Image (cartoon, helix red, strand yellow):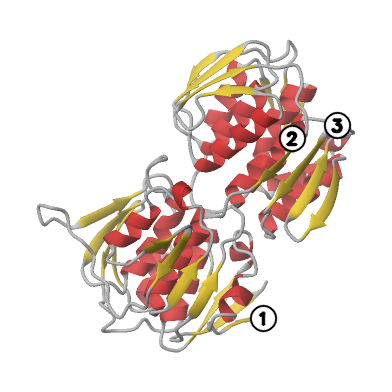
């Protein structure tokens, strides 16, 4: 198990460029299974979750070529379906939650898929009902093998288009259903579909491959099935979660940072969410400029009541940034209620911040009230363990702002979502040692 030793209290100055978006890359890589022709994908982040998925596809028989530092070629013209039944496949796919999105492509192209209980962050119950119900409406049959703890999924009569109203706007659920529907017979209508930029990117790529998807960017998608899809080239968007992490990190450490090439039009409400905490977020073309902050003050609502920041489906605030917003608020002036609606265990890392001296009241598994210290009292250094990707980067930010040396264990969780984060931050003045 690797750890970070972080010498806090040092300001950074310089330029950071966000990596390719993890959540988009996972969808796009799974979509390469939909065609036997070559697909070239650029701006793929070099992180554990993505690398593990690429290796899983290699093991399945996909021809993968590493063209450059962040570019890959995929050609799924000789898939080994027998490998799906192997213990090795089940072990690898169960440890990677993104592997759930190979079901749609495999089912629609080959009529068969296997799914073990997926892994990923331990942030509470993450149900797969949206995936299952949507695929069942298209004609998939699910059978649970109790002995092996896997779902065997087949389409004995093929997949057929259908109208469906999703019970939640699940991003991965929508992606899975869309990928299955593009090769199904007839028309599929998905209402209450997720419409995040990463899902828009998936739909645009599929359309370039020959799919017929309309309503891209809305919560109502109409998909007319086609017989086959061809190859294409695609570039992954910059990671909005990393952009937000850098904004919070700059403010909390009093650093001056320029974040380059952020794809501003795809950041949605993220910049304004940090502005609510009193942080200056300047836009210069497609770059963001965060000046040094000695103080920043949380806004209140018009009637004077306490600010409430909560997650919501796009175009609302992504839940992946609430951990960063929460830790950033600990050194603001004022108070804010952080309401994490989606996952019931994602706020449990706040006890580590409380141990560091943060003033936080954990109201329940979904809500925490932060009373900012206004930089009058620095956080204390501590020894911590990262529970998940997003809480992990929040703990890194806390340790970088603390007065002293902190240690964060289990940083493999952070490496799952952030590419060479220690080297990139050290290059502009941070002091992080990997051991």
Left or right: residue 147 versus residue 264 is right
Residues packed near mark 1 inside 10 Å, few (<14), some (14 to 19) or many (20 plus):
few
Left or right: residue 365 versus residue 387 is left
Left or right: residue 18 versus residue 363 is right
State whether residue 255 is above or below residue 85.
below
Residue 218 in percent (x, y) is at 45, 29
Residues packed near mark 3 inside 10 Å, few (<14), some (14 to 19) or many (20 plus):
some
In-front residue for pair 432/364: 432
Residue marked by disc 2: 147
Label 1 sits on a secondary structure element that is: loop
Label 2 sits on a secondary structure element that is: loop
Residue marked by disc 1: 435
In-front residue for pair 42/313: 42
Specify which label sits upstream in the sequence, 1 or 2.
2
Specify which label sits upstream in the sequence, 3 or 1.
3
Label 3 sits on a secondary structure element that is: helix
Residue 154 in percent (x, y) is at 73, 21
Instruction: In the rendered structure, find residue 244 and report the number of the disc placed on it.
Output: none
Q: Is residue 347 visible?
A: no
State whether residue 307 is above or below residue 81.
below
Residue furthest toward the bottom?
Answer: 404
Eye-nearest disc, 2 or 3: 3
Instruction: In the rendered structure, find residue 81 and report the number of the disc placed on it.
Output: 3
Residue for point 70% across, 50% down: 42
């Amino acid at each position: 198990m690797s750890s970070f030793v972080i010498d806090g209290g040092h300001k950074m100055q310089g330029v950071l460029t966000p990596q390719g978006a993890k959540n988009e890359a996972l969808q796009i890589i799974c979509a390469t299974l939909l065609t036997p022709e070559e697909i070239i994908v650029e701006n793929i982040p070099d992180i554990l979750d993505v690398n593990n998925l690429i290796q899983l596809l290699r093991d399945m028989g996909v021809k993968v070529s590493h063209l450059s530092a962040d570019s890959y070629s995929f050609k799924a013209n000789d898939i080994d379906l027998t490998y799906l039944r192997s213990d090795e496949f089940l072990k690898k796919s169960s440890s990677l939650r993104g592997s759930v999105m190979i079901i749609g492509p495999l089912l629609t192209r080959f009529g068969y898929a296997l799914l073990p209980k997926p892994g990923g962050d331990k942030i509470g119950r993450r149900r797969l009902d949206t995936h299952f119900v949507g695929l069942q409406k298209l004609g998939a049959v699910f059978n649970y093998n109790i002995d092996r703890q896997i779902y065997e999924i087949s389409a004995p009569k093929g997949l057929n288009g259908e109208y469906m109203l999703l019970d939640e706007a699940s991003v991965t659920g929508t992606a899975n259903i869309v990928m299955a529907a593009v090769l199904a017979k007839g028309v599929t209508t998905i209402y209450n579909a997720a419409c995040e930029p990463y899902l828009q990117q998936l739909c645009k790529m599929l359309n370039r491959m020959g799919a017929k998807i309309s309503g891209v960017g809305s919560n109502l998608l109409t998909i007319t099935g086609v017989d086959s899809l061809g190859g294409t080239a695609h570039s992954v968007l910059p990671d909005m979660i990393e952009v937000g992490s850098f904004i919070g990190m700059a403010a909390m450490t009093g650093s001056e940072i320029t974040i380059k090439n952020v794809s501003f039009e795809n950041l949605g409400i993220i910049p304004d969410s940090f502005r609510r905490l009193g942080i200056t977020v300047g836009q210069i073309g497609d770059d963001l400029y965060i000046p040094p902050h000695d103080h920043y003050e949380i806004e209140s609502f018009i009637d004077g009541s306490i600010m409430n920041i909560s997650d919501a489906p796009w175009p609302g605030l992504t839940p992946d940034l609430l951990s960063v917003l929460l830790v950033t608020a600990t050194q603001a002036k004022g108070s804010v209620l952080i309401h994490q609606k989606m996952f019931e265990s994602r706020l449990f890392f706040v006890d580590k911040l409380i141990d560091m001296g943060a003033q936080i009241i954990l109201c329940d598994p979904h809500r925490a009230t932060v009373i900012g210290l206004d930089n009058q009292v620095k956080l204390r250094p501590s020894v911590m363990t990262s529970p998940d990707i997003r809480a992990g980067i929040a703990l890194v930010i806390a340790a970088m702002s603390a007065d002293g040396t902190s240690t964060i264990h289990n940083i493999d969780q952070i490496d799952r979502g952030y590419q060479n984060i220690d080297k990139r931050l050290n290059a502009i003045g941070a002091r992080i040692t990997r051991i």
